[in-house]
Amino acid sequence: LVDNKTEPQKGKLFEYCDLARADKDNLPHVLILDEINRVDLSRVFGEVFSAMENRNTDIPTAVGGFKLNIPDNLYIIGTMNEIDFSLEQIDFALRRRFLWFSYGYEPDILQDIVIHKNEDQKASLSPRDIERLINAASALNNTIGATDELGKQFEIGHTFFAEVVDIYSSFKAINNKTNRIQDKLFRENGPATILWDISIKPIIEAYLGNVEEEDKKKIIDNLNNTFFKASLD
């Protein structure tokens, strides 16, 4: 409101465009839109579609009489979950203006995340602890990918597995003797069990929402066995 009147204002995108355009070295500037499919993109983007396609060109906006000009060095990255049902609502105006890449589960990426969290939280997990987690996560996702009712697109993401570091850190905070226990993650009723119960199992159950209960139980039991047995390798 300006003097009790509603007046249009330029949003953040205009600011980002100005910053990128003012860069004398023409370095890449990146705008990341997480879960880009969670909104009505046609309404949110509007004239942005045209400005993305016609870089360095003034595109009049429907509101405010502004002109949007997106420079070549502003890169827009959108992320989304492949199994999200709202993907069906992604229109072709968006699809044809982006390059599309699929990024699934990668053991090396999970390892990097866990090592970083381990150092950041001073969790004192050993290389063997981390190796066991990677083995368990990889075996679980391989089995998910080979399960008829699921498939590769239902693999569990890195952040789900990496939560085990936070769980273990909580264990340490409650019991300072935890650091001297050899089996830090996969001992009975330990962090890996909690991770399975509160995070991994619920999401698999959601994925199997339309599967008969008896079949669902068999699949989940098999995945559970896969996850914990692989940790022993």
Image (cartoon, rainbow, N blue to C red):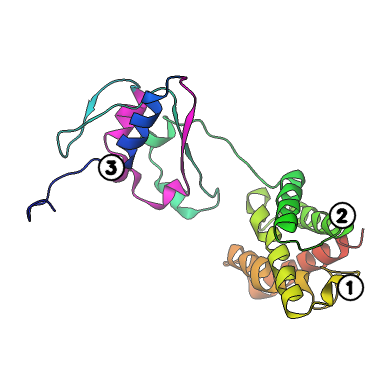
Label 3 to label 1: alpha-carbon separation: 53 Å
Q: CA distance from mark 3 to mark 2?
A: 47 Å
Q: Which mark is residue 181?
A: 1
Mark 2 secondary-structure assignment: helix
Residue 35 percent location from the top left of the image: 47, 49
Measuring from the top left, give residue 106's x and y in whole percent: 72, 45
Query: In this rendering, is residue 159 above or below 58?
Result: below
Answer left or right for 30 relative to 148. left
Q: Quadrant of the C terminus?
A: bottom right
Q: Which mark, by number, is residue 127?
A: 2
User: Mark 1 and 2 residues: CB-CB less than 8 Å, in contact?
Assistant: no
Within 10 Å of disc 1 (Cα), the crowding (few <14, some 14-19, many 20+) is few
Q: Mark 3 = which residue? A: 11
Task: Identify the residue at horizontal 67%, vertical 52% (top origin).
Answer: 151
Query: Along the horizontal axis of the image, is 93 left or right of 156?
Result: left
Q: Is residue 51 magenta?
A: yes
Q: Is residue 77 above or below residue 200?
A: above
Instruction: Name the element at disc 3.
Output: loop
Q: Earlier in the sequence, mark 1 or mark 2?
A: 2
The magenta-colored residue range is 25-53
Find the distance from the CA under tag 1 to the CA under tag 2. Answer: 14 Å
Tell me which amino acid carries mark 2: Pro
Amino acid on which disc 3 is placed: Gly
Residue type for callout 1: Ile
Tell me which residue sits at (86%, 62%) in the image. Answer: 231
Judge from the rendering whether residue 95 lies leftward or rightward of residue 149; answer left or right: left
In this rendering, position of residue 223 left or right of residue 52: right
Write the residue at 84% across / 69% down.
Answer: 184
Q: Are marks 3 and 1 in contact (CB under 8 Å)?
A: no
- Identify the image quadrant of residue 26: top left
